[in-house]
Image (spheres, grey):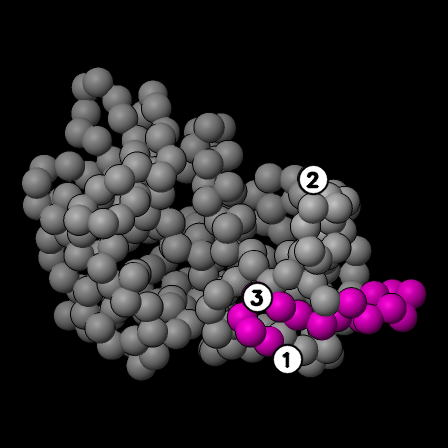
């Protein structure tokens, strides 16, 4: 997935009201940018962080820049746009670059399922059960190399897991895909201390037959693409 407009570097001054960030551009101007991440962004929203933003040429939009990446001191990148996760996965499905989800003829996004939810992708093929795929963007790291989800309490994520479990019990394939939008991780775990209910929901989902898989991404200021598979460490049983 290439960024439609070339990104430019900036420095974060502060992030506030979840979706707003004051930034300083290279020419010294201070402007407000859109922050496309509703989470806590632990470790990523510190003043002084080096970030990359996308200029917006649409005069109908209120803000002229959108925050897309963090560049870490060690040269690694973090994709902070949660919406980018589904776009990366959709491109990977179309290019058949996700071995765990290969072999399906159609990939339908945002399909209603459960009581009041939408699954990120419904994969269908005439000779096999439908596959319901839920994508979670992961950016939290508290220990070197270990990505964790979630970064705050998420009742919505817990509800989605229970609905995936019901799908698996009904005989369809149910897949939870953690997309680690970082280039510095070697595995993924559940942040049980931040959201115990979610951790327990993961355990229930596994027992019901939900598959839990993870991939990282390849990131540059030009593009984000699917990367290698990562091990997923189990939460509480």
Q: Which mark is residue 19?
A: 3
Q: Is residue 43 above or below residue 121?
A: below
Judged by depth in the image, the label closer to the viewer, 3 or 2, is 3
Task: Determine the secondary structure under disc 1.
Answer: loop
Counting residues from the start of the chain, the first of labels 3 and 2 encountered is 2
Task: Determine the secondary structure under disc 3.
Answer: loop
Which quadrant holds residue 78?
bottom right
Image position, residue 237 (x, y; %)? 15, 70
On the image, numbered disc 1 is attached to which residue? Answer: 46
Residue at the spot x=65%, y=65% of the render?
A: 70
Counting residues from the start of the chain, the first of labels 1 and 3 encountered is 3
Q: Which residues are magenta?
A: 16-31
Residue at the spot x=55%, y=74% of the render?
A: 17
Q: CA distance from mark 3 to mark 2?
A: 21 Å
Disc 2, disc 1: CB below 8 Å? Answer: no
Q: Which mark is residue 8?
A: none
Residue at the spot x=69%, y=40% of the render?
A: 4
Disc 1, disc 3: CB below 8 Å? Answer: no
Disc 3, disc 2: CB below 8 Å? Answer: no
**Image quarter of the N terminus:** top right
Which quadrant holds residue 206?
bottom left
Counting residues from the start of the chain, the first of labels 2 and 1 encountered is 2
214 to the left or right of 114: right
On the image, numbered disc 2 is attached to which residue? Answer: 4
Q: Give yes or no for residue 152 being in the magenta stretch.
A: no
Image position, residue 208 (x, y; %)? 11, 53
Judged by depth in the image, the label closer to the viewer, 1 or 3, is 3
Q: CA distance from mark 1 to mark 3?
A: 15 Å
């Amino acid at each position: 997935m290439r960024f439609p407009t070339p990104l430019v570097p900036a420095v974060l001054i502060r992030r506030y009201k979840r979706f707003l960030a004051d930034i300083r551009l290279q020419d010294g101007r201070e402007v407000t940018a859109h922050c496309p991440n509703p989470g806590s962004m632990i470790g990523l929203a510190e003043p002084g962080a080096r970030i990359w933003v996308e200029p917006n040429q649409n005069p109908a939009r209120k803000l002229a820049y959108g925050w897309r990446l963090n560049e870490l001191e060690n040269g690694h990148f973090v994709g902070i746009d949660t919406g980018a996760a589904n776009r990366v996965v959709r491109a990977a499905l179309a290019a058949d670059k996700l071995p765990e989800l290969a072999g399906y003829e159609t990939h339908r996004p945002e399909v209603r399922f459960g009581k009041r939810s939408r699954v990120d992708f419904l994969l269908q093929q005439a000779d096999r059960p439908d596959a319901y795929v839920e994508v979670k963007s992961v950016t939290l790291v508290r220990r070197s190399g270990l990505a964790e989800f979630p970064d705050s309490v998420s009742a919505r994520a817990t509800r989605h897991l229970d609905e995936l479990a019901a799908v698996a019990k009904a005989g369809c394939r149910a897949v939870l895909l953690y997309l680690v939008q970082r280039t510095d991780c070697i595995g993924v775990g559940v942040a049980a201390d931040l959201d115990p209910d979610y951790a327990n929901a993961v355990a229930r989902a596994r027992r019901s037959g939900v598959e839990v898989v993870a991939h990282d991404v390849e990131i540059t200021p030009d593009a984000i693409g699917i990367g290698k598979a990562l091990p997923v460490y189990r939460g509480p049983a």
